[in-house]
Image (cartoon, rainbow, N blue to C red):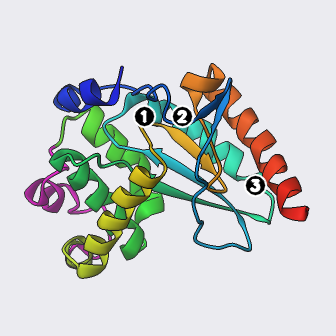
């Protein structure tokens, strides 16, 4: 399913969007970003997962990704970036993600948000929906909602949207490696294959840095 259809069907929890042909230089199971993008910490090989909480494939990928992260080498830094694609519902879910990150509640809430959005059909893309849902799930709901509405989270949303645009992200979940390569289940053939390809791309990025 392409990005346009995914956004049109978001209320029904649209699934994985496929990359647009010609957006990158294709090399079978991964794609090369042209031009390459700067990373946050040049001293580390950066791995970014682009995702959103309404995506069933992102939810299925998450346990495999968490297991993979436990074995990540010390020279690799990982972070998630929620996809927004100029969509208000996705922006609301991204705001929830960053509020949880800023408040320190992300580890406890991440899996619960997937379940609340996809199974319970909670309107967690709205402030009212988040405010109601968060009660009893965090130590300090007021602190959480203050973070939710903060200037810092607003800035994170803007930057997340810009990063996805710069990397031409057209589907989720997608892994970006060191600002140079993209891979995903739709390219590699499965979630497991995507993680294996990410390992190979990390090694390639390491070799290129050593030159």
- Location of residue 21 with respect to 103 vertically, above or below: above
Please name the residue that numbered disc 2 is placed on. Answer: 61
Residue 42: x and y in percent read 69, 72
- Name the residue carrying label 1: 171
Contact, CB < 8 Å: mark 2 with mark 3? Answer: no
Is 32 part of what is drawn in magenta? no
Which residues are the magenta region? 123-142
State the residue lying farthest toward the left: 128
Which one is in front in this view, the residue at disc 3 or the one at disc 1? 1
Name which quarter of the figure residue 118 lies in: top left
Q: Secondary structure at mark 3?
A: loop
Ranked by sequence position, the earlier of labels 2 and 3 is 2
- First in sequence, mark 2 or 1: give its number: 2
**Quadrant in which the C terminus appears:** bottom right
In the picture, measured across the screen, residue 40 lies left or right of residue 56, that is: right
In front of the other: 141 or 17: 17
Other-residue count near label 1 (Cα within 10 Å), few / some / many at <14 / 14–19 / ≥20: many
Q: Position of residue 102 (x, y in %)?
A: 38, 74
Find residue 119 and report its horizontal and vertical position in percent.
27, 31
Q: What residue is drawn where x is 70% and y is 27%?
A: 193
Quarter of the figure that contains the N terminus: top left
Q: Is residue 188 above or below residue 209?
A: above
According to the picture, the residue beneath numbered tag 3 turns out to be: 72
Asked which secondary structure carries label 1, the reply is loop
Tell me if residue 88 comes above or below residue 61 in the rendering.
Answer: below
- Judged by depth in the image, the label closer to the viewer, 2 or 1, is 1
Nearer to us in this view, 107 or 47: 47
Is the C-beta separation of discs 3 and 1 under 8 Å? no
Does 129 appear in magenta? yes
Instruction: Give me the C-alpha separation between circle 3 and circle 1.
Output: 24 Å
């Amino acid at each position: 399913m392409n990005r346009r259809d995914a956004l049109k069907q978001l209320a029904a929890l649209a699934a994985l969007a496929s990359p647009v042909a010609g957006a990158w230089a294709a090399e079978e199971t991964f794609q090369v970003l042209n031009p390459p993008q700067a990373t946050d910490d040049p001293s580390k090989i950066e791995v970014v997962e682009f995702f959103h909480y309404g995506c069933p494939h992102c939810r299925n990928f998450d346990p495999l990704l968490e297991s993979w992260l436990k074995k990540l080498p010390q020279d690799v830094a990982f972070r998630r970036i929620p996809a927004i694609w100029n969509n208000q519902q996705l922006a609301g879910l991204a705001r929830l993600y960053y509020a949880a990150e800023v408040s320190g509640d992300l580890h406890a809430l991440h899996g619960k948000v997937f379940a609340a959005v996809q199974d319970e059909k909670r309107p967690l893309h709205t402030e009212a929906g988040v405010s109601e849902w968060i009660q009893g799930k965090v130590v300090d709901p007021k602190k959480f909602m203050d973070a939710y509405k903060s200037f810092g989270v607003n800035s994170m949303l803007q930057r997340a949207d810009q990063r996805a645009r710069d990397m031409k992200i057209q589907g989720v979940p997608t892994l970006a490696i060191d600002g140079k390569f993209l891979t995903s289940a739709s390219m590699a053939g499965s979630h497991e294959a995507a993680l294996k390809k990410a390992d190979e791309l990390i090694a390639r990025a390491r070799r290129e840095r050593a030159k």
